[in-house]
Image (cartoon, helix red, strand yellow):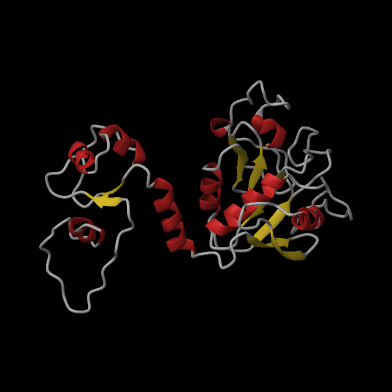
Amino acid sequence: VSVSALAGANGMGGDRNAGLRPGQVLIVPEPGVVFVSSGQSLASIARAHQVSAAELARANRLDEHSALRIGQRLILPGYEAAVAAKSAQQRWGAARRPGTVTLHRLAPREQLRIRLVDRRGRVSQAALRGMQRLLRPRGSRRGKEPHPRLLRLLAQVSDHFGGRAIDVISGYRRPGGYTKETSRHAAAQAIDFRIPGVPLEALRDYCAGLDHVGVGFYPHARFVHLDVRRTSARWTDRSGPGEAPDLDRAARAPPLDDDDAEGEPAADDDGQAPIDEETDSAPER
């Protein structure tokens, strides 16, 4: 890495001549990260790294004419995904066995450790069968085979958060109550879950960055909804366990595109409040 980047990563403001002391610990910045030095602008940094100022601004969610501060951290275009993965690994740790997930079903109380995807990202029949049983409706011995992409997404989420165990609130549900026939839950294409030790907002934000998914945030019921769909949707539901939906209208997702076979408003078909299955007093959905 460059001397200026090393200085910037350690709070020296890009000072190439900063003095060091014996035993001082230095942070080595990841490739693709630069730090603003005195007199630099977005345009000059872009020229130095042979990218356009517009690309550099977009990679850092800045306006092309934004003023920079000395020591400000910037990501070069093309390095966004690698830097995000590195940052996640530093915060959450690395999964010991990528693709292998530990799941806790809260009611009935069951635990399953299973390899959802192999090294090539393929979902096995054994994984489908195991998850079909785990995600079955409460009080039932039979479930419905989940969508393979849902399992790939769960493996990706688990790996991102260091392989932490997943608490399953709800998986496949039969239509009835607040669960409509058009719900992804009824199609075995959705899961409601949380990860102990991970803030609910962090889990929501990571899932919201995935493509072609529906993501519901349930802060009072304490879970995140994730489903498989062609047109992405996001919503917030402030209902509690066992309560009717209480959608945050400001966060409500737009209707699905015409090419989506369900043709329902994205928040309505899954904007429901499944019970927290830790409580046995709530009615069955």
Residue 270 % position (x, y): 70, 37
Residue 262 % position (x, y): 73, 27
Against 123, is 51 above or below?
above
Against 263, is 230 above or below?
below
Residue 20 is left or right of residue 251, and the answer is left
Residue 136 is left or right of residue 232, and the answer is right
Against 137, is 7 above or below?
below
Q: What residue occupies the far right of the structure in this picture? A: 141
Residue 245 is left or right of residue 71, and the answer is right
Give the residue at x 54% y 59%: 161
Against 62, is 113 above or below?
below
Nearest the eye: 89 or 13: 89
Which image quadrant for residue 198? bottom right
Nearest the eye: 205 or 59: 59
Residue 61 in sight from this viewpoint: yes
Residue 18 % position (x, y): 12, 64
Residue 240 in sight from this viewpoint: no
Q: What residue occupies the far bottom of the structure in this picture? A: 22
Viewport quadrant of the N terminus = bottom left
Give the residue at x 68% y 51%: 151
Q: What residue occupies the far top of the structure in this picture? A: 258
Residue 131 % position (x, y): 76, 55
Give the residue at x 62% y 55%: 155
Viewport quadrant of the C terminus = top right
